[in-house]
Image: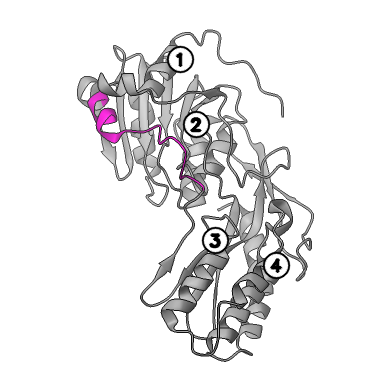
Amino acid sequence: MNRFVVYSFCLIAAFLCHGCEMADEFNESPLQNFEACWKILDENYCFFEYKQIDWDAVHDKYISMLNESTTEQELFQVLSSMTQELQDGHVNVVSKYFYSTYDGWFQNHPSNFNWGIVQNYYRNGAYAGDYNEIRYTRLFNNQIGYIYYGSFNESVLESELNEIFNYFKECKGLIVDVRDNGGGSLTNSDRFASRFLDQKILCGYIQHKTGKGHQDFSDPYPLYLEPSHGDLWLKPVVVLTNRRCFSATNNFVSKMHILSNVQTLGGSTGGGSGFPFTSELPNGWRIRFSTSPILDVNKQHTEFGIEPDIPVTLSSEDVKKGKDTLIETAIQVLLSADPPFKSKSQ
């Protein structure tokens, strides 16, 4: 993990310990657990101002639904509904029996992905193999490489990445497909992204909370990405995205978007740019939330997603033919990428 992220995380942890201590002042009644949850978020959640959320009004809306005879299940439902007002997939309430999450960030968006159709490309291409969540092959008479990375929860060894990129050395272009990758480890996503650059780059910023106020943040700390010492890919790349690209994958796309030899294609990513942290309620339930915003290279939020360079939707006509509109479009983009893509300004 980038040393700035580690440093920021340490500061976050130190600050939030105070929040955990304050939670201990409450008892285990439904009303007091509600107050503890609301207060932890009030003092530590990082997107109130950006999302223009009136957290006091949210408090008044949901406290009226509780009393001292409220059951555990009823309390969980109220806390779940209250936290969903934050519109954040990183916010979860977790009890022994229940788990609450917000999925509005990808609902009502086209999926732009059909794994069964993607598998047909493997069968029809020069199939190579897979490592954990990475599957790869060559398409279009071996001219185009294709990598599908399904989850950054799964790590791939540097030696395995060397083998993969060496396999593509004769290809003209490369498709990197991260559709439906819901995130995972920033270490894994950065390890992968480092294969696509040959010099250290500024890739974004991170802030941390400095107080209990909704606007109490540090100045942005710069984040950098350095090239891998392994095999690099510096020829044209198309990154395929959809709305289910979240968290570490959103961050990966933000980094790749900077590079002059990369185009993103498909749909908007799902966002999720807050660094998550978990605290505990008096009754032992856990509340997870975003506490440090990670900004892009222009110091802009990507919490609600990143728009693609080339918007493409998976068409129903192509699906009937067993084709993936995004892959087919990416192949054509890469075959015509001579000279490589136009440089992007930061």
Residue 183 is situated, as x and y percent measured from the top left of the image, at: 46, 48
Residue on which disc 1 sits: 334
Q: Amino acid under label 4?
A: Ala
Instruction: Give whichever of discs 4 and 1 has the lower sequence position.
Output: 4
Q: Who's the residue at 66% across and 23% down the image?
A: 344
- Residue under label 2, please give it: 267
Q: Which numbered disc, 3 or 1, marks the residue that appears first in the sequence?
A: 3
Q: CA distance from mark 4 to mark 1?
A: 51 Å
Distance, label 1 to label 2, CA atoms, is: 18 Å
Q: Which mark is residue 84?
A: 3
N-term mark: 1 or 2: 2
Residue type highlighted by circle 3: Gln
Q: For mark 2, give the secondary structure.
A: loop
Whether the residues at callouts 2 and 3 have beta carbons within 8 Å, the answer is: no
The span picked out in magenta is 105-121
Q: CA distance from mark 4 to mark 3?
A: 14 Å
- Residues under labels 2 and 4: Cα distance? 34 Å
Is 42 placed above or below 337 here? below
